[in-house]
Structures are given as structure tokens and as C-alpha cells.
Amino acid sequence: MIKKIVFVLIAVLSVNVNSFANQSNITYLIDTPTDSILDYGSYDLQFRLFSNGGVLSKLNFGIFKTLNLGVSWELSNIVGTGNVVVAVPTLQLKFNIYEGSQKVPGFAIGYDGQGFFYDEEEADFLQKGKGVYFVAGKEILLPTLNLNVGVNVNDFKDARLVGFVGTSISIIEESLTGMLECDNIGKGAYTRLNAGLRLWITENFDIDFIVRNLLTNDEEKFGCERILKLSYQSRF
């Protein structure tokens, strides 16, 4: 019964917002970047609600035609008991090398210092961010089915390449998108499989329903985590 109600709600919302949705600027899936960047003069404001009453906020700008600049800030224990854990703000940069064509994928390089679950004693994130990354993306096989593949280095003390791959596809045209990604490829037990749905409420506002780390309930790896993310895009 609950599943039927949820399906009906999504269907109604999708019909109402179909003419407003905009999927052209998907710069990130869940934890992995795409080759796309924000348009010049636009911005993206995000709030990601995660475990332990945490909020991760991000603000990114399209400062040039081929360059995005952003900052993010993680706060834990905002809701609930215990002291609020305040992480160090981090920087994001993304440069579009090539927009892509029908035959050749698009390419981007970037830096993302935002990790997850900040440890005050170590003054570092328990799960590191992307660090320096390179990503290529292209529509494949089916219309709206996009594939992004990349590598990154996120630990410069023990520098080695780590891989990631992500896909997205339009489930309801211009309203609802499905996302699936595999992150930390090459790090053994720390490889993560994440999935999510992105629902556009208006042309500028969307909501992500995410399940992160699908293949484990290990508390040391923060288990199978349910996340809600709100995102608003607009122009100056």
C-alpha cells in the first residue's frame, strides 16, 4: 500500500513539473563528478542531510565558460544530542577540457577536497574526498543514458589512482532521473556502490533520494546510509 502511495505521489509531481525540469547541468551524481559544468554566470546551492544529524552544504559558481569554483562545509550532530562537529571548509575547482560530441566523450579535470564524516581529533575526514580527478562522460546506447568514468588521487601521502564510474538515465522525461555509481574502485573493502533518484520540483529546484554504500552494514564503514539532498540552481 505504501509503495502504491509513493508511486502515485511521484507520478503526480512528475506530471506537474514536467515542463519545468532542467537536466542539462548535472555536475555531480552522488559522490562522483560528471564531465559537465555549470553555465557561465550560474550557481548551484546544495544541502545534503546525512547520518548523525549532519548537513553538508555546497555552493558552486560558473565563474568562466569553462571553469567552476565552489566551497563546501560539513556540520555533524546539528540534530540530536552531543556536540556539533564543525569541519574545515573545503574548495572545489572544475575545468571543462572538451564539451564532447556525438562520437567523442566530454572531458573535465578538477579538485574536490570535500570528504565525509569529519574527525576533530585527526583534523581530517574519515572518508576522503575526490582530491584531484579526471572524468570523461558520454551518452551511450540509449537516449538520456549517460556514462561517466574517471580516476582520482585523494591521499597524497600514499598517492595512487582510484577509479569511479557513474550512470544516470531519465526515468520520466525531464522530471525523474535514476543514478547508480561505484566509487573508490581499487580500494578493496572501501569500494562503495551508491544509488539514487533525482526529482525535479521546478526548473531550478530538485531533490535527491539516495542510498549510499549499498553492499555493507559494517558500522566502521558507516553502513548502508540513507541521504536526502536539496539543490537549487539559478543565474546571477
Image (spheres, helix red, strand yellow):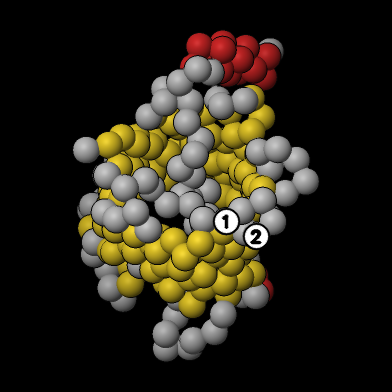
Q: Is 207 situated above or below 46?
A: above
Name the residue type under label 1.
Gly
x 41%, y 67%: residue:
110
Cβ atoms under marks 1 and 2 closer than 8 Å: yes
Q: List x then y, in percent, for residue 15.
A: 56, 12
Q: Quadrant of the N terminus?
A: top right
Q: Is 46 situated above or below 13?
A: below
On residue 100, the disc is 1
Q: CA distance from mark 1 to mark 2?
A: 5 Å
State the image quarter where residue 230 is shown.
top left
Q: List x then y, in percent, for residue 168.
A: 63, 44
* Nearest the eye: 123 or 114: 114
Name the residue type under label 2.
Val
10 Å crowding of disc 1: few (<14), some (14-19), many (20+): some
| Residue sitting at the far right | 141
Does residue 124 appear in the picture of this structure? yes
Q: List x then y, in percent, for residue 34.
A: 52, 55
10 Å crowding of disc 2: few (<14), some (14-19), many (20+): few
- Residue tagged by mark 2? 104
Q: Is 4 situated above or below 171?
A: above
* Nearest the eye: 15 or 123: 15
| Left or right, 97 with reference to 193 | left
* Nearest the eye: 205 or 194: 205
